[in-house]
Amino acid sequence: MKLMFCLLALIVVSSAFGELYRGHQLFRIEINEEDDAHIMHKLGEANSEMLDFWTVTVPGRPMDVMVSSDFVDEFVNVLAKRKLSYEVIMTDVQDVIDKEAMESRKAREGRKKRDIMALEDFDYSIYHTYDEIAAPGEPGASDPKPVVYFEGGIHSREWVSPATVMYFTGKFLRRYMESDPEAVRTLGMFDLHIVPLLNCDGYNYTWTSNRLWRTSRKLNPDFGCIGTDLNRNFNAFWGGEGASPWPCSIIFRGFTDLDNVETQAIDNHFQKLKENNRVTKVFIDWHSYSQLILAPWSYDADIDPPIDTDKQIAAAGAMAKAMNETNNVPGGYIHGVGTDILYVSSGTSKDYGYASTPQATYSYTVELRDKGQFGFLLPANQIIPTGNESYYGVIGMLDWIYENDYN
Ligand SMILES: *[C@@H]1O[C@H](CO)[C@@H](O)[C@H](O)[C@H]1NC(C)=O
Ligand SMILES: *[C@@H]1O[C@H](CO)[C@@H](O)[C@H](O)[C@H]1NC(C)=O
Ligand SMILES: *[C@@H]1O[C@H](CO)[C@@H](O)[C@H](O)[C@H]1NC(C)=O
Ligand SMILES: [Zn+2]
């Protein structure tokens, strides 16, 4: 009887996600020549249903790409022809997804389900559903100070992003209430505006239907597909390179800029702040994975870095140093200018944060853990270490800004 119950539970767990990724493999490819990066890029465009790039294609850095089971043989042939070295990091992505679902279930067993969780009851060590995250709350009021904006979960499959933003937010609040000097100092210098989970619909979809969904859930009529890459939809160099005009692409930029409710809501918020003459000092969009802290620009590889680049890099360096020192995570966090490190992309939140409505001098994309062992499927036991190093990273950056560029 007991066995049968277990079996039933097992079936429920796996059917929650279906078998979408059965036999799909995650390849890590060494890319050393610009030519190879271009070939991979083109191959991806021509086979967008078969290839899902988990990291960006850029010479000198390994590229992680998930290959559909039907396409594995052909893909291996292409790699052999180009004499590219590779390793297979996951031989069956569905197995990793199923394992994650099983662990999540186990961690939840015996817990009471509550509609609204008090701050001190919220368990930061597990991944949460949308319903658990979306508890109503009142924004705090205070004397206006420079605004620091943090946003998690713009790409729904990057689960550690909202988990991290919630973790360090909770930690700031708890420590503040305990009169911890660091937390009191930080919250005394800045007003924190926090969106823990921007792409709510996409995130819910990763729990109910497709664990690796990235984009929004806006219908693209006439094309029969769903989703916009919200991180290509901002009104900053919108429509340029590194974003797709094709509605079925996972980097679809939208039909016009800000044509998704999520990006509109963000822009409305910053328009209001601007009308009230509020200064936004810091804008950080938290993603995973690769362990990077990226400053503007992203939209054009040939453009000079912005005039604030020295300050931006120094503040990012303070963050990287604090993140490195917290846990000595293998590989550490690398900081730099977006286009130097990643592939070009336009309409992104980081360029928006710096150049568009917010005009935050310090605007970044942070890519959290890991370096590719688990990628988007980062086990829950890494949430707290990732959140903890991010907490100290935020303090490191904000201290640097307070000391060097506050008034
Ligand atoms: C989450 O997705 C499920 C399945 O599609 C749907 O029934 C539910 O209403 C969604 N929840 C929210 C909060 O959108
Ligand atoms: C966070 O990191 C600090 C510094 O390494 C360490 O002392 C502390 O125990 C960590 N806290 C948690 C909850 O992991
Ligand atoms: C963080 O660690 C990485 C890996 O050791 C290193 O390359 C990088 O320079 C470190 N960053 C800082 C600011 O110390
Ligand atoms: Zn992302």
Image: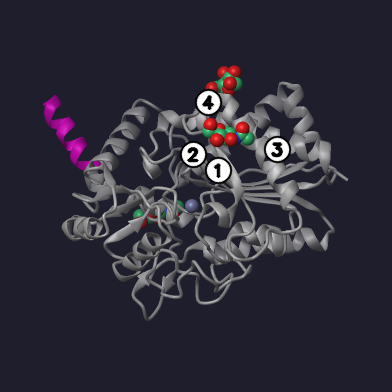
Dot 4: within a 10 Å radius of its alpha carbon, few (fewer than 14), some, or many (20 or more) residues?
Answer: few
Q: CA distance from mark 4 to mark 2?
A: 37 Å
Residue 170 in the image: state x and y as whole percent: 61, 32
Q: Is residue 185 visible?
A: yes
SS of the residue at dot 1?
loop
SS of the residue at dot 4?
loop
Q: Are marks 3 and 1 in contact (CB under 8 Å)?
A: no
Q: The C terminus is located in which quarter?
A: top right
Nearer to us of marks 4 and 2 is 4
Q: CA distance from mark 3 to mark 1?
A: 29 Å
Q: Is residue 391 visible?
A: no
Is 303 left, or right, of 240 in this rendering? right
- Examine the rendered structure and indicate whether residue 373 appears above or below residue 193: above
Q: Amino acid at mark 3?
A: Met
Residue 291 in the image: state x and y as whole percent: 51, 40
Colour setup of the view? one colour
SS of the residue at dot 3?
helix
Residue bearing mark 3: 397
Q: CA distance from mark 1 to mark 4?
A: 34 Å
Residue bearing mark 2: 115
Label annotation for residue 135: 1
SS of the residue at dot 2?
loop
